[in-house]
Image: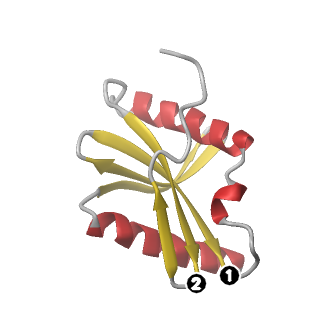
Amino acid sequence: MQKTTGRLGELRAEQVLTDKGYEILARNVVLPGSEIDLIARDGAVIVFVEVKTRTGGFAPGRAAVTPAKQKRICKGAVYYMMRNGLMNRQARFDVIEIQGERVTHIENAFPYQGPAF
């Protein structure tokens, strides 16, 4: 049930991004030490998106994107950008929360957390 809910949330998140004009580059990318739900392009910016779908409870989805999770996403983002020749591009980290019918897209949800280049 949890995987199905998560997958449906990711599909809704993808639709929100494409409706805003983003180009989806990759879905459910597994990288060393990290998994990234969606990778998109917003103009010249590469956007790494964590999708959090909630069916109940009171805590917002962004609360589940802990500092440790943020570091893993950043590590995966660097690996993805290096592997795809995108190190000259700006990157951003967004979170999309889905709770029932409400979808909240949080741009720049957290800063890059890793070594400087």
> Cβ–Cβ below 8 Å for labels 1 and 2?
yes
Q: Name which residue lies at 57% across and 36% down.
A: 74
- Return the residue at label 1: 55
Q: Position of residue 57 (x, y in %)?
A: 76, 77
Amino acid type of the residue tagged 2 in the rendering: Gly
Please give left or right for residue 108 compared with residue 89 in the image: right
Residue 59 in which image quadrant: bottom right
Q: What colouring does the structure picture have?
A: secondary structure
Specify whether 19 is left or right of 70: left
Q: Residue 50: x, y in percent?
A: 55, 55
Q: Position of residue 32 (x, y in %)?
A: 62, 38
In the displayed image of the protein, which residue is found farthest to the front? 58
Q: Where, quadrant-wise, is the N terminus in this rendering?
A: bottom right
Q: Residue at x 58, y 84 (%)?
A: 100
Identify which residue, 9 or 106, lies in the foreground: 106
What's the residue type where badge 1 is placed?
Answer: Thr
Label 1 CA crowd tier, 10 Å (few <14, some 14–19, many 20+): few
